[in-house]
């Protein structure tokens, strides 16, 4: 069966390549990114009753670094949901009761076997919390070369209102499969899970994912569905995605769905218990239109927005966002939709190391959300209101924290694990992030600010951008030396009261 799946999957990749060369006069940035990216093919079967999933994954791994590699490392994010997880656990004590309303529930991943180029290898599970799979290569993989890695694995899905877990309404499969760590600066970036923020970092890749699941479930995912078949009471759906940096899925017995087409993109809103479903689909349409006009085209054919059991407002994945059903104020629910769709530009098409520079994608997503309101007056908010309330709440946060901590640290460029509390993380990445971008806009003017963001987007699409890339975009457009100013925000030395007086 595995061989049949693999040859089928190989055929799909070949068809995608043929389609691309037949259909495109000149290769787009997405085509170019896709042709140099690694290829993942995953065949998975969901045991819905027992909330487990078994899968075989083949990665055609392309060594796009300048180094020879003796091993390939993969993140095993489901192990952050183990009862024994301590260093890189997914849920903090303060989040526990909202994450686990029925008490703690185990989640994990077991690697059954790994092969390289068809040969079994002695893989290792490493990391401080069994969070890394290391696959040894018997001969070094030279720069520019590819190799094929097969991994068979099983996951246990916890009863947890999280990215990876199930609640009363949805089963969320975020960060569920072994995904290659980014290789940079001579090593793999192996940062583990954090209860704060979105601690993920990956390269874009191409995916063909086949999932078998009970027919009473509705599935939404990254990518586009290319085939659905039914056998007995099971549905098998095959999905493909090119040049995306992750592949997530969500299933529900309760999902209803509304769709719209915007340009070349189909937007689907999956929901339950939503009297305002039409309005929420419209919000997704407005966000896609607004951000495409402001920053550059959304390059994918599908955008799925799914209501979900999720404890933290919303979550972005390529082509798929989760919107928490705990957000019960309608204007805030819309705000989450807008913020998560902004992430399709900042995180999705342009990636960044979210463990080291969370302010980059979160600051830009919140700043984009503020700008959205000026272009969409029917939402009865303005960027001035949003930014004004961000400033006053940030100043209040600083006052309170200065009372608590003698040497209160306002640096933004800290590793995600170095923030003391979730509140500190939120204020110093989201809120201070949006204030930094607003301050830069004040200095250079809004017209140039748009030009900077458009250039940043087009120059870094489908790559992982660093803070230096962002500084470069500012300096190229404005011909001003802004590195020192931006750094003073990031390292906490900017004198905020002077800026606001
Ligand atoms: Zn966000």
Image (tube, rainbow, N blue to C red):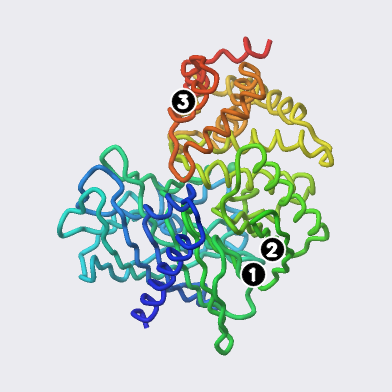
Task: Tell me what residue is drawn at x 41 percent, y 72 percent.
Answer: 9
Can residue 401 be seen?
yes
Mark 2 or mark 1: name the one nearer the start of the chain.
Answer: 1
SS at mark 3?
helix
**Within-10-Å neighbours for mark 2: few <14, some 14–19, many 20+:** many
Give the Cα separation between the discs numbered 2 and 1.
9 Å
Give whichever of 238, 420 is nearer the camera. Answer: 238
What residue is disc 3 on?
472
Q: How far across and down, in percent of the image, does residue 248 sit?
A: 52, 60
Give the answer, above or below, for where 371 lies relative to 278.
above
Mark nearer the viewer, 3 or 1: 3
Q: Which residue is mark 2?
A: 270
Res 291 quadrant in image? top right
Q: Horizontally, is 227 left or right of 500 in the view? A: left
Q: Position of residue 497 (x, y in %)?
A: 63, 12
Question: Tag on residue 189?
Answer: none
Query: Residue at label 1?
Result: 252
Mark toward the start of the polypeptide (3 vs 1)? 1
Which dot, 2 or 1, sits closer to the camera? Answer: 2
């Amino acid at each position: 069966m595995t061989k049949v799946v693999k040859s089928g999957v190989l055929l799909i990749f070949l068809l995608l390549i043929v389609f691309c060369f037949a259909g495109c006069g000149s290769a787009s940035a997405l085509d170019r990114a896709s042709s140099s990216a690694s290829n993942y093919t995953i065949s998975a079967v969901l045991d819905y009753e027992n909330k487990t999933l078994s899968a075989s994954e083949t990665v055609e791994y392309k060594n796009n670094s300048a180094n020879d590699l003796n091993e390939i490392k993969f993140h095993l994010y489901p192990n952050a949901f183990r009862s024994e997880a301590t260093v890189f656990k997914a849920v903090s004590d303060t989040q526990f009761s909202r994450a686990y309303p029925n008490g703690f529930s185990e989640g994990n991943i077991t690697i059954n076997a790994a092969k390289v180029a068809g040969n079994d290898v002695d893989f290792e599970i490493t990391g401080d919390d069994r969070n890394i799979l290391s696959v040894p290569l018997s001969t070094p993989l030279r720069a520019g070369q590819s190799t094929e890695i097969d991994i068979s694995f099983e996951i246990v899905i916890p009863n947890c209102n999280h990215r990876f877990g199930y609640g009363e309404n949805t089963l969320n499969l975020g960060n569920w499969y072994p995904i290659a760590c980014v290789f940079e600066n001579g090593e793999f970036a192996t940062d583990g899970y954090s209860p704060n923020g979105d601690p993920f970092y990956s390269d874009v890749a191409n995916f063909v994912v086949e999932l078998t699941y009970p027919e009473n479930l509705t599935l939404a995912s990254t990518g586009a569905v290319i085939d659905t078949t039914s056998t007995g009471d099971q549905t098998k759906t095959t999905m493909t995605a090119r040049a995306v940096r992750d592949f997530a899925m969500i299933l529900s017995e309760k999902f209803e769905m509304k769709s719209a087409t915007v340009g070349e993109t189909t937007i689907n809103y999956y929901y339950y218990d939503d009297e305002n479903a039409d309005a929420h689909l419209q919000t997704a349409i407005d966000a896609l239109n607004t951000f495409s006009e402001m920053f550059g085209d959304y390059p994918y054919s599908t955008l799925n927005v799914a209501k979900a059991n999720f404890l933290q407002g919303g979550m972005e994945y390529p082509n798929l966002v989760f919107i928490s059903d705990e957000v019960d104020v309608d204007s805030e629910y819309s705000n989450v939709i807008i913020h998560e769709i902004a992430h399709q530009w900042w995180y999705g098409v342009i990636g960044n190391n979210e463990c080291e520079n969370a302010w980059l994608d979160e600051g830009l997503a919140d700043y984009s959300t503020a700008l959205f309101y000026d272009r969409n007056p029917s939402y009865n908010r303005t960027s001035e209101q949003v930014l004004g309330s961000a400033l006053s709440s940030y100043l209040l946060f600083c006052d309170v924290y200065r009372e608590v901590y003698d040497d209160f640290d306002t640096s933004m460029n800290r590793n995600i694990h170095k923030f003391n509390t979730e509140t500190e993380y939120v204020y110093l990445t989201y809120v201070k992030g949006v204030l930094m971008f607003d301050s830069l806009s004040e200095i250079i003017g809004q017209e140039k600010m748009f030009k900077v963001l458009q250039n940043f987007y087009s120059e870094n699409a489908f790559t992982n951008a660093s803070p230096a890339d962002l500084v470069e975009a500012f300096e190229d457009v404005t011909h001003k030396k802004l590195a020192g100013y931006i750094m003073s925000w990031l390292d906490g030395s900017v004198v905020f009261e002077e800026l606001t007086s």
